[in-house]
Each structure stands twice: as C-alpha cells, then as structure tokens.
Image: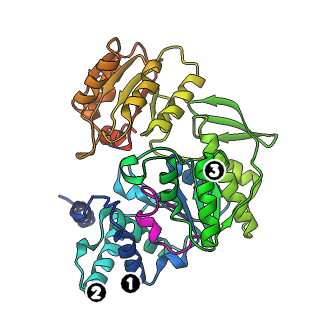
Amino acid sequence: MAKPEEKRDMRLATRYRNVIKSFDNKWHILDDTRVPIVREVLDWLENPDQKLKIIHIAGTNGKSSTGAMMGAVLQANGYDYGRFSSPYIKSSREQICINDNMISEKDFLTYYDRIVAIFKTHGVSANHLTYFEYFTVISLCYFVDQHVDFVLFEAGLGGLRDATNAINAPLLTVFTKISIDHQNILGRNLLEISENKAAIIKPGTWVIDYAGQDLTARQVLKNKTLAVGAKWFEYQQDQITIANTTPAGLDLIINGTPGYFLSMSGAFQVHNFSIVLQIKAALEALGYHFEVEKTRQGLANVKLLGRMNYHKDVNILFDAAHNVDGINGLVSALNAWHLKIKPTLILGVLKDKDYHEMLDIIVPSVQRIITVTPNNKTRALSAEELAAEILVSYPNVDVEIASDASAAISLAMRVRESSQALIVVTGSFYTLNAIQKDNRI
C-alpha cells in the first residue's frame, strides 16, 4: 500500500502531466501579438525580468552549449544561476534549472496556479499563454524567488516574435553562430534571419557576438546595436588551441596556457567556448570576479544532456545535431577521432529541416543507418520515409528501420561489427527524446 507522501507525489505528477497536456503547443511564431501578450503578463506579475541579471542568448547553433559552459563557470566561481533553455530530452522540467537542478513539479504548479489566478482578475482564461510562453514566464518568476545571481536565458526560435523577447533590456545580449535554419519562419536568407534574431537587442544592453560570425550577420547586429543605443562589446579574440580531442572532451591551450580540459567533445565547441570567454570578460568589466583555477574546474565539469554525450561503457555517442551546421560539427568530430571502424548511425529527422544535405554530409562517414521516427507528431519524418529517402540517394548503404525508436539502440548493438564500433544517435532533439524512454541517455 502506498504511503501518504507517495500518494501525494503521484497526484502531483498526474496533475503536472495534465497541465502540460492542456497547453497550446504551437509556436505562433508568425503572430505579432504574442510578444506584447507575454510582456503584459510580466507587467501583471510585477516585472520579474527587471529584478534579474539576464544574459539573453540567441543564435542558430550553440546556444545551449554556450549556456551550459557559462553556467559551469559561474557555479564554479560561487555564483548561483538560473537557466532557461529548450527543447528538452527527458523531462519538460529540464527547461527551467538552477545550478543544473530542474524545477520541481510542485514549484511549477505553484507558479502556474499563481499565474492563472492573476489571469482571472484580468478576465482572461488559462490558455492565454502557450506552452513555451508559460515556461518562459514561470522561469522568470521562479528565478526571482530563488534569488539567483544570473539568468542564462536562451531564445527559443529566432528573436523578433520569440517569447523571450518580451523581457526588458537584459544585462548582456549574446549571439552564437547565426546560419540558415527555419527559412519558412525566420527569413529566406542569412540577412533576413539575422534581422529577426537582432530584434532582441534593446537599449542599454551590452552586445556580445561570436568572433567567427558571418560578416552579413555581424553587420546586421552592429547596425541594430547602434540604432537602439546598446553597447557593442569590443574584445580581442582569445587564441584557443586544441591539444587533443577524444569523445570524452578537449584538451585546450588558451592564450598559450595549457592545462584546460573542456568536458564537451567536438572541435566546434571551441567556437562556443570563445563566446563564454567573452561573456566572462564582459562580466569582469562590470565588476564581477572570476578565478582562473575555479574557471578551469568548471570547464572540466560541464554537463549537457544530448550534446556530444559519450557513454564509454557501451561506446555510444548522443548528439542532438538537428541542422546542416550541427551535422557538419558532428562529422568533423568523428573524423578527428580517426575511428578504426565506421560508426553505426541511428538517425531521425524533422521534415522541415534540410535533411537531404544533412544526409549528404553524414552518410559517407558511417557504416550503416538505423532510421527512427522523432517524437514530434506534426514535424517528424517517419522512419520509413527517411529510409526510403536514403536508399534513393545511397542505394549501397545498409539501412534498417526501427519501428520502435526506444529499441533502436538494442538493434544497433546487435548489428554493429563489434563493441569497438561506435554507435551515433543524432538528427534531432526529438530523436533523442524518442529513444530515451528506456533511460539510455
């Protein structure tokens, strides 16, 4: 017989699931009314965003990796940080964390109930906000009450109509690499996509840009910074050299000083790390203190679910590379490891991505492919459709279909040549979400 606390926890879990299911899960990303609605809700909640030191992070690739590294550096130096990021892999609560600890179901429901009560006083219903908007607003309220020192606040999609754009001017506005993605939503080319993302730049914020940013994107960001009265953070680029790369991470030399280990694999992570060093320098210019040895310890302990996560005991790599840039980075890492046997690939993609080019990049680097269906009913390309697409362009590749995504790893372990053959799981966050049901990630 269940104990009273177990019954309470079960009731909480059931209610949490029901509340999440009740949310409008659409992005409404072309609706110009959404950001003003979120802004009004924040006003009703006494402007939690204005009580926080927010580091707003936007870009196409690397937002979560940059946030995870910066969070590890902050925590190692004695700062508590809140982190809002998306999408999730195991639990929707991953999107709201403090020092890597997810918000509890109880706390989430407490803030949800508080917001719904305020909605009633203003004559609007509980569905006044969408799924992503609820998480955005709840994260800010939670971070205020938990008295965090900083908030790493990751944009969801683009910038202009993204719910995170409802905040007032953040402490820092950070841009990772901007590239072509979501052209049907954000813009037809790099110029339009950059303009969409630049819309988060607000008066008074300090703007930090990825050092290797495309010149078109860089000019858009600079123009917007000047136009709104923000400050462009000028910074001498650090010299970062990779001394060694393995699936476990990178040995780095920074400005001639060796002995740094970044526990995130893939040479592309150096680009994200260069942004972290800029953020740290900006915070130091604002009066915050960081110690070299503590920073070194933080980098050695970075954890980020689903981004180049290597499980040595079973020789499996999980990476949520979900677009052309991400797949390029993954393949570069695989090539740098000089594997003796080509990997077995478990792949699932979304149909609104440029998956044909993604296939062109990764197929030559793998031995065989097991296709799966990502856990997204409206956007997923089915495992059967993906297998058919692969066979049209690559008739000589060994392709199998995993009808049950969570069984794909068991299938891969049976068909690979030996335990020395790496299994790579990739293609989308939703692919990893579909596979994690048996808690392998």
Task: Determine whether label 3 and label 2 are within 8 Å by CB.
Answer: no
Task: Describe residue 387's horizontal placement relative to residue 426 as left or right.
Answer: left
Q: What's the residue type where badge 2 is placed?
A: His
Task: Determine whether label 2 and label 1 are within 8 Å by CB.
Answer: yes
Sequence-wise, the earlier of marks 3 and 2 is: 2
Residue 400 spot, x, y in % from top left: 27, 20
| Residue marked by disc 3 | 210
Sequence-wise, the earlier of marks 2 and 1 is: 1
Q: Main secondary structure of the magenta part?
A: loop
Label 1 crowd bin: few (<14), some (14–19), many (20+), radius 10 Å? some
| Closest to the observer, 281 or 184 | 184
Task: Describe residue 8's horizontal placement relative to residue 98 as left or right.
Answer: left
**Snapshot quadrant of residue 162:** bottom left
* Secondary element type, mark 3: loop
Q: Residue furthest left?
A: 1
Residue at (23%, 32%) from the top-left corner?
404
Residue at (47%, 44%) from the top-left corner?
180
Nearer to us: label 3 or label 2: 3
Compute the Cα span from label 3 to label 1. Answer: 35 Å
Compute the Cα span from label 2 to label 1. Answer: 9 Å
Task: Describe residue 204's horizontal placement relative to residue 438 as left or right.
Answer: right
How many marks on residues? 3
The quadrant the C terminus occupies is top left
Region of the chain picked out in magenta, as a range: 151-170
Residue 251 magenta-highlighted: no
Sequence-wise, the earlier of marks 3 and 1 is: 1
- Which numbered tag is attached to residue 44? 1
The quadrant the N terminus occupies is bottom left
Q: What's the residue type where badge 3 is placed?
A: Tyr
| Residue marked by disc 2 | 122
